[in-house]
Image: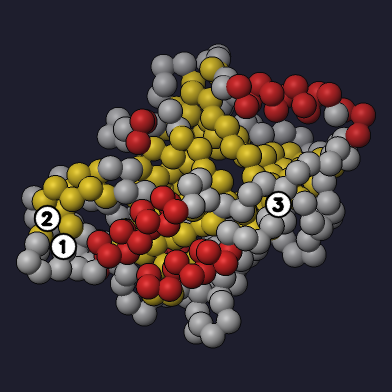
Amino acid sequence: MSMLRHFPFFSGLLGSIFALTSCMEVGPPVAFSSGTPGLKDTTYLESTPENRQNRVVLLEEFTGVRCVNCPRAHTTISALQSLYPGRVAAVGIHTGFYSVPYAGQAEDLTLPEGNNIETLLGSAQGYPSGSVNRRQFTGESGVIISDQKWSNYVNLEKEVLPSVNVGLSRSWLEGDSSVVVDCRIRLNDSSSTPLYLTVYLVENNILGFQLNPSPVGLDSAYVHKHVARKLLTPYNGVALQATSFPVGRIFERSFALNWLPKWRREQCEIIAAVHRGGNSGDVLQAAKLAID
């Protein structure tokens, strides 16, 4: 049986769980899938108080290599991440007509579930566009909005105290052919509606084709960032199941990912978001973690 190489957060988490045995609710049996040891799917109650995290805003961008104005949106995201370090988790979803690869393009950046995600959030009226925490803001006709409105809404959302805390860790299997991603979610406020978890693998600094406004035109060495490479969950998330959702409810979910050689570990991140269901599924908190 393969052994997991644990990172410090994972080891610390296990220690905390054992230390809190006396105040834990017995959760459902841990689920082991695909023969991978250590996968978790459980919930329990924890009485120890926990400080709320800083808000991390999820920005899901719909983009494509044939979208002439999309480099403008890429610049906006880079500026937001520089302005609010660690507070903006960006996911670039290449989908639709604008993502069709050019002849000679080394790699197709399209996310297979991209169209499903766009439809779930209400469909874009044009590119570049995207959602900020999957919220429909006052005065907006939908969840997906123009890139020129992102800055204002990111600034507003980052000040909202998160109603859940999200922690991430990862462990590589021996041989580094697979990685296990562990998610820990704690409710800071009670919830009366079901909650869901969506987890992405994204990759930065991929050289490839991108159409730019004149006079640049088609750039064959454009640097693509936060490209959604893989969904570790269904496109609409996995339900966090429990009989009740009081303050202190803990959920632990693990996901195993077979690693593809084309993904450069030093450029990859895990992006996770806890949200409500449906196309009005506001994101309660996001988190990101370097995979390497």
Q: Nearer the viewer, residue 133 or 151?
A: 151
Residue matched to label 3 = 164
Mark drawn on residue 219: 2
Asked if the residue under mark 2 is in contact with the one under mark 1, i.e. CB atoms within 8 Å, the reply is yes
The N terminus lies in which quarter of the figure?
A: top right
Residue matched to label 1 = 211
Residue 63, image x, y percentages: 31, 63
Instruction: Check disc 2 and give the amino acid type.
Output: Asp
Q: Nearer the viewer, residue 56 or 273?
A: 56
Point 84% across, 41% down: residue: 49
Point 54% across, 30% down: residue: 170
Instruction: Check disc 1 and give the amino acid type.
Output: Leu
Furthest toward the front, the residue is 83
Q: How many marks?
A: 3
**Left or right, 184 with reference to 72:** right
Q: Residues within 10 Å of mark 3 (few under 14, many from 20)?
A: many
Q: Is residue 260 above or below residue 273?
A: above
Residue 64, image x, y percentages: 26, 62
The kind of secondary structure element at disc 1 is strand
Residue 55, image x, y percentages: 61, 53
Mark drawn on residue 170: none
Q: Earlier in the sequence, mark 3 or mark 1?
A: 3
Instruction: Check disc 3 and give the amino acid type.
Output: Val
Residue 61, image x, y percentages: 39, 62
Q: Residues within 10 Å of mark 1 (few under 14, many from 20)?
A: many
Q: CA distance from mark 1 to mark 2?
A: 6 Å
